[in-house]
Image (cartoon, rainbow, N blue to C red):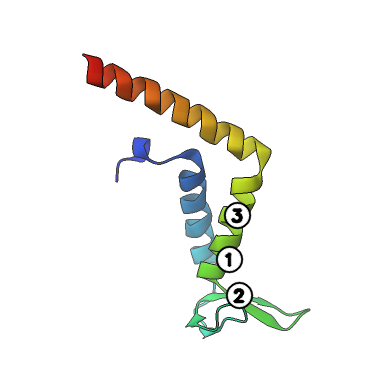
Amino acid sequence: MIQDDLSPIEIELQRIANRIDKACDLSYQVCNECGEKGKGFSNLMEGTFTCLRCHMKKEAERLDTDPEWIRKERVWKLRKAISDRKLNMG
């Protein structure tokens, strides 16, 4: 996929996923949220485990509700619409 086709939130989620994947250890446990076994994070204070997929869902929700990221997404969509229109016209 071309980098220009990704929205700012999608690019940020990829960056977060790469960073988190490198930070996780190689142990696989059962997620307390979805019940599937996978790589993730243990919360020692609460005694819970969250898999990468559930953690990324939380990150996506956080970015989707953050006013700064909403603004970046809207600007990106407007610029993309303008450039697509220019390509279609000429």
In the orientation shown, which residue stands out farthest toward the right? 45
- The Cα–Cα distance between marks 2 and 3, rounded to whole angstroms, is 16 Å
Q: Residue 62 vs residue 34: left or right?
A: right
Task: Classify 10 Å Cα crowding around label 3: few (below 14), some (14-19), many (20 and above).
Answer: few
Instruction: Say which of 14 and 25 sits in front.
Output: 14
Say whether marks 1 and 2 touch (CB < 8 Å). yes
Q: Residue 85 vs residue 15: left or right?
A: left
Task: Classify 10 Å Cα crowding around label 2: few (below 14), some (14-19), many (20 and above).
Answer: many
The residue depicted at 66 percent of the width and 43 percent of the height is: 66
Say whether marks 2 and 3 touch (CB < 8 Å). no
Location of residue 69 (image quadrant): top right
Instruction: Say which label, 1 or 2, has the lower sequence index.
Output: 2
Q: What's under tag 3, amino acid-wise?
A: Glu
User: Looking at the image, is 86 positioned above or below residue 63?
Assistant: above
Q: Position of residue 47 (x, y in %)?
A: 73, 84
Q: Which residue is mark 2?
A: 50
* Number of numbered discs visible in the structure rendering: 3
Q: Residue 14 vs residue 67: left or right?
A: left
- The Cα–Cα distance between marks 1 and 2, rounded to whole angstroms, is 6 Å
The residue depicted at 50 percent of the width and 51 percent of the height is: 13
Task: Name the front one of labels 1 and 3.
Answer: 3
Q: Secondary structure at mark 3?
A: helix
Q: What's under tag 2, amino acid-wise?
A: Thr
Q: Which residue is mark 1?
A: 55
Instruction: Say which label, 2 or 3, has the lower sequence index.
Output: 2
Q: Position of residue 32 (x, y in %)?
A: 62, 81
Instruction: Say which of 53 and 82 sits in front.
Output: 82
Q: Position of residue 39 (x, y in %)?
A: 51, 76
User: Looking at the image, is 10 positioned above or below residue 77?
Assistant: below
Location of residue 79 (image quadrant): top left
Q: What's under tag 1, amino acid-wise?
A: His
- The Cα–Cα distance between marks 1 and 3, rounded to whole angstroms, is 10 Å
